[in-house]
Image (tube, rainbow, N blue to C red):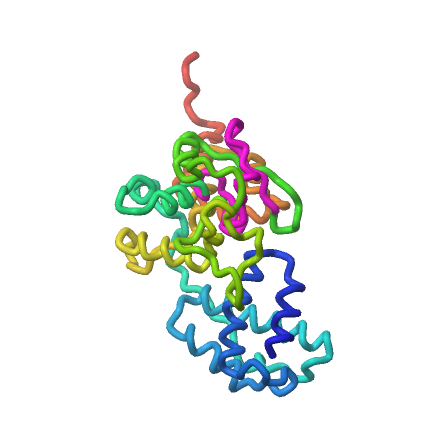
Amino acid sequence: MTAAVERFLESVQAATTRAGYAETLARLTAVTGPQYPVAALTPEQYAAVMERWTAAAAATWNRHLSALVSFTTWAQRQDLLATNPARRLERRKSARRGGRAIPATQLDKLFTDPAHALRERLLWRLLYDTAARAEEVLTLNVEDLDLEFRRARVVSKGGAIEYVHWATPTARLLPRLLAGRTCGPVFLADRRAPSSGRRAPASGDVCPVTGRGRLSYPRAEYLFKTASAELDPHRQGWTLHQLRHSALQHLAQSGRTAPELQAKSRHQHLASLGRYVRLGEETSARITADADPIQRRRPR
């Protein structure tokens, strides 16, 4: 089992995706044992793996299930597995709770509250300023930053190299977090990374100055949900992805056009912005009134 899992993870190119899959598959290895044959995997074992996230949010459940499904598909292609142990597991529907954008006043509280660590406040502000995906920002290295022009080079979802841009609040916080560091991950974990063993990260994910590893997506997500739970009316906390959604919706509400939003979000297709930008009845009424051919003409 262990050898197959390692081979599968090596085939996953995106570092953040690989880290997320590793968490799920570590649980699978713990359930079956490291020497268990992949060909003998059963639906019962997959169900035992997913029991850990039974009470988790739908997005969390679906993320771990996707890891199992991806591993299963890979194992079948490698002729290691003839059945589908994930066949009894189903994805969960996310509960819709109205708008997914976080109110700007609540965001301002999160960004400026000194009770939150500098690392977290900068990460949240950077995600909002850039409207970037969380995995893109968490995989940033100091070498990717262009502080003079307030931009960073990221690897997008399709593997292309693109730039994201930030505003003054982020520009003021970044030097404080970097503290003179010139290389290594921008966002570091709290502890030094292990130098050997199963949990030892790749050398590129370790800061050569502090010895600390890269901050993981699950840890960053947990910290944001915990910090925002008190402000969330549902007391569940918000997700890092909602910072991207909030940035785009707030820009749309300020009058930015769809092509401008596409440039900011780097979506390949304008149609993809429909899930982010829903301005509501007030915007519809204003647009209709402004275009009314019978409206009273304003004096020049």
Q: Report if residue 7 lies within the magenta region.
A: no
- Count of numbered tags: 0
- Expressed as whole percent of the image width and height from the top left, the position of residue 193 reads 47, 57
Residue drawn 59% across the image and 47% down it: 271
How far across and how far down the image is residue 26, in percent?
52, 73
In the drawing, does residue 142 fall left or right of residue 80?
left
The magenta segment is 127-155
| Residue 110 in picture, x, y percent from top left | 32, 45
Q: Is residue 4 above or below residue 184?
A: below
Toward the viewer: 293 or 119? 119
- In the rendered image, which quarter is residue 175 located in? top left
Q: For the C terminus, give its image quadrant.
A: top left
Residue 138 belongs to the span the image colors magenta: yes
Please give the name of the residue rendered at 59% of the width and 83% of the height, measured from the top-left corner.
Answer: 35
Residue 162 point in image, percent of width and height:
62, 40
Classify 237 as above or below 82. above
Residue 258: tell me if it is visible.
Answer: no
User: Would residue 155 be found to the left or right of residue 253 on screen?
Assistant: right
